[in-house]
Image (tube, rainbow, N blue to C red):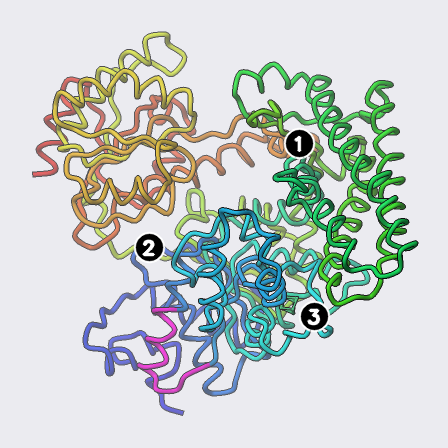
Amino acid sequence: MNPELDPKRALSPHGVFAARWPQFEYRPAQEEMAALVWSICQKGGYALIEAGTGTGKSLAYLYPVFYGNIEKTGISGPVIISTHTINLQQQLFEKEIPFLNETLGVPIQAALLLGRGNYLCLRKLHYFRQNPRLLEDGLHSCFTRVWTSAQRQVGSVEQLGYALPLALKEKITSEGATCLRKHCPFQQRCFWMAARKKAFAAQVVIVNHHLFFTDLAVRRQREFNDEGLVLPPYQLVIFDEAHHLAEVAAEHLGTRIDQKEINHFCHRLLHQEGKWGRGWLPSLRQRLIGAVKDLALMQRLIGIMDGGLMPGLRKLETLFNGFFLSLASHEGLAASLFQGNDIKRRFTSNLLANPDLNGQVTRLLATLDEWTGQLSRFVDGLPEEEALREDFIFLAEAGHFFTGIAANLPLLLDGRDDHFVFWLEGRPEGELAVCATLQRVPLNLGELLSRELFTQLQGGVLTSATLAVEGEFSYIKENLGLSLLPTGTCREVILPSPFNYQEHVLVIVPSDLPSLEDPNYLKAVSLLLPSIIEAAGGRSLLLFTNRQQMNQIYARISCPLKAAGIQLLRQGEEPRHHLLSKFIRSPKTVLMGMDSFWEGVDIPGPQLSNVIIMRLPFRVPTEPLFQAQWEALAKEGKDPFLHLSLPEAVIKFKQGFGRLIRTQTDRGVVVVLDQRIKTKRYGRVFLRSIPGGKLITAPQTELASLIQKWLT
Ligand code: SF4
């Protein structure tokens, strides 16, 4: 064995990278991380690794995986690498892995697996190619373009390089429920099957957290079918951007019924347009006349369609919309929804105890039962004609969809099971006025993950730039169930960033700003912001926790900034990536954003020199899962603020802070406009958790000159 290849020293000044890569920069943290990941590959167990920005963590976890595969040691089976963002997935697959293949000269087999709905379905493409009249008028030219791409072996929506209208995408992409798998005539050429096959043969499979937990949700079903699995059997997993794991896991390991999905399905089946309509049922009704030779059978099928399926579905649609509206009113959401707000409302009682809701659900379930029964009779009666095969598949899927809703609805309305958190979520939505989702999520997600994921594997690595709070991993460990593993199973390490935060970052907290509750706060902040933004020459990112505050401040500062020649961009005005590219391209620009702008904004260089954090990012206490976790902690005698609210806010704060310094030479200012960071005892936890910076408290009148001086 060549010692320079050993993962413990490959990233050292005497390792393989220093020898073969002229641009190699030695980073002790990267070397340490690679050694730890290699130890997990060899001996199993888990590692929680907080690796500061600039550590080079992807190389530090990829290299040991490569080495293990090259030397055929340490790892049994493929390694799954799961990330939160598609950007990181692409970076790993398109840059880092080819780089390693080339540098090491021994390529390993890697596969990038996207969500199933990203792949084109050849069976559907052929169907619409043969039946173009079944496509809406505006979709024909785009369909022809996709068809041509598919003939050139472009098999995923990502690779098309142009936007696909949603109405076309849902018609021509792969779906688990309607896939014919081994019975499909296109199976040999199927893009999804090929991607999955490649993943099953690969040594490294790159996925996102959503796909990972979709697969885990299938594995959790007692009688799952191997064909429904997305990932090959694995024993080692590496989660990058691991601070998102809990929220994605909760989404996939719970149960939900979404009004929008129901309406969408009804629309696909019924959609009236033109003489006969383009919905599946009206279109099929028309085609039955030519496709079914037996006159009596045709009349019987049309009878079921006209007398049952189509009117029944319209009735179902009305009943569902009425039911969700009653539910929103019952839970006191309707008024807020009509004012245009998104709302979540947790419930802990059995909503079916309400006679009105109970009556509606009884009617709904009876209508669902009747409708799915008619659908079964209809599908059973369809002759086995090639021309009707797609109809058969789609209608079977419709039956499956509505049967699932009937089974889950009573379960989702009985909020008394304290192992789960139940809530109703409402969004204002076009002419429907209200669009709601019912959710049921396991309360103790950590226990579930520990039992069904972590104890089932040989080991894993969980990494991110933001996992620890004041140097401790307790929060993430409890949240994900790693604290339930036997002592010594999970190793923890914080690897500092190589960037010089002390020299390059000035953290300013105004000493005389009113507190958040003070009625003068908004006015004071609105007067202060233009001066500190001007001092930075624009180039500022303003991070908010609440849309209302963002809009109020936007209204107050847009005029003075415009007068100073500074462009102001606000989240929601354009898609996120447009806003970001505008911000990068235009000098003297300011960007205001909420949630998604606290992370994933990677703007190296002076274009982003000033990050302004409007308030410490504590979660709203009414958020259902948060509220239930809070209560559960209090019941256990723990302080929920210290165990839940504070660490969660600190991790988000670190993400926001991390937007500023992206390279060795970046320099800038972070202004915190929330006095609590200085006046409250817990404020110190935020300051002690960030990677560094020179902290200054100064009166508002001095901030502009301090910023100007720091940046010049
Ligand atoms: S195997 Fe499934 S996804 Fe592939 S072409 Fe056939 S039906 Fe579509």
Viewer-nearest of discs 1 and 3: 3
> Which residue: 36% across, 57% down?
495
What number is the disc on residue 141? Answer: none
> Which residue: 78% across, 51% down?
400
What quarter of the picture does the C terminus occupy?
top left
Instruction: Tell me which image quadrant ligand 1 sits in.
Output: bottom right
Q: Is mark 3 within 8 Å of ligand 1?
A: yes
Asked whether residue 556 is drawn in magenta, I would say no
Report crowding for label 1: few under 14, some 14 to 19, many 20 or more residues within 10 A (C-alpha): many
What quarter of the picture does the N terminus occupy?
bottom left
The kind of residue on which mark 1 rests is Ala
Tell me: residue 676, above or below residue 100: above
Mark 2 to mark 1 CA distance (whole Å): 34 Å
Q: Earlier in the sequence, mark 2 or mark 1?
A: 2
Mark 2 to mark 3 CA distance (whole Å): 48 Å
Q: Is residue 272 visible?
A: yes
Q: State the predominant SS element of the stretch in magenta.
A: helix
Q: Position of residue 68 (x, y in %)?
A: 48, 81
Identify the magenta region.
94-108
**Which residue carries the number 2 mark?**
496
Left or right side of 673 for 291: right
Q: Position of residue 206 (x, y in %)?
A: 49, 66
What number is the disc on residue 181? Answer: 3
Front-most of residues 376 and 473 = 376
